[in-house]
Image (spheres, grey):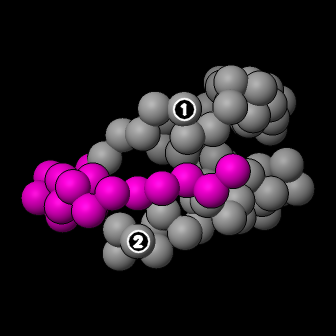
Amino acid sequence: MKFLILDAQINFYLDNGFIEFENFFSKEKIQILENTIDTLTKKDKKLPSIDQYKASHDLFRKSEIIKKIALDTNLVNTAKALS
């Protein structure tokens, strides 16, 4: 299903620098993403915060699941509309 972004939402983003969408991703997709991130970062939990951040950078390069979600057509089109 195509996600529709309204002019008012674009204006809010331009004015505030952020925007939140309800139900952009299904609960199932969010759970899959959380589980994948937890699995990929589990070994890094004992590292200092800055090293955890560095280890978690670009997770889409380490996971086809994350890459597929990051390249989701609705997400990409919404990002384009907001840029």
The percent coordinates of residue 36 (x first, y second) are: 81, 35
Query: Closest to the observer: 55 or 25?
Result: 25
Sequence-first disc among 1 and 2: 1
Q: Residues within 10 Å of mark 2 (few under 14, many from 20)?
A: few
Decide: marks 1, 2 in contact (CB < 8 A)?
no
- Is disc 2 placed on a helix, strand or loop? helix
Q: Is residue 44 magenta?
A: no
Closer to the camera, 8 or 59?
8
Above-or-below relation of 44 to 13: above
Q: Is residue 21 rendered to the left or right of residue 29?
A: left
Q: Determine which residue is flagged by label 1.
A: 23
The residue nearer to you, when weighing 73 against 44, is 73
Residue at the left extreme?
Answer: 15
Residue type at numbered disc 2? Ala
Q: What residue is shown at x 75% (from left), y 34% (from top)?
A: 29
Residue 81 is tagged as: 2
Which residue: 48% across, 63% down? 78
Residue range of the region highlighted in magenta in the rendering: 1-18
Residue 54 picture location, percent across and down: 58, 52
Whether residue 39 is visible, yes or no, is: yes
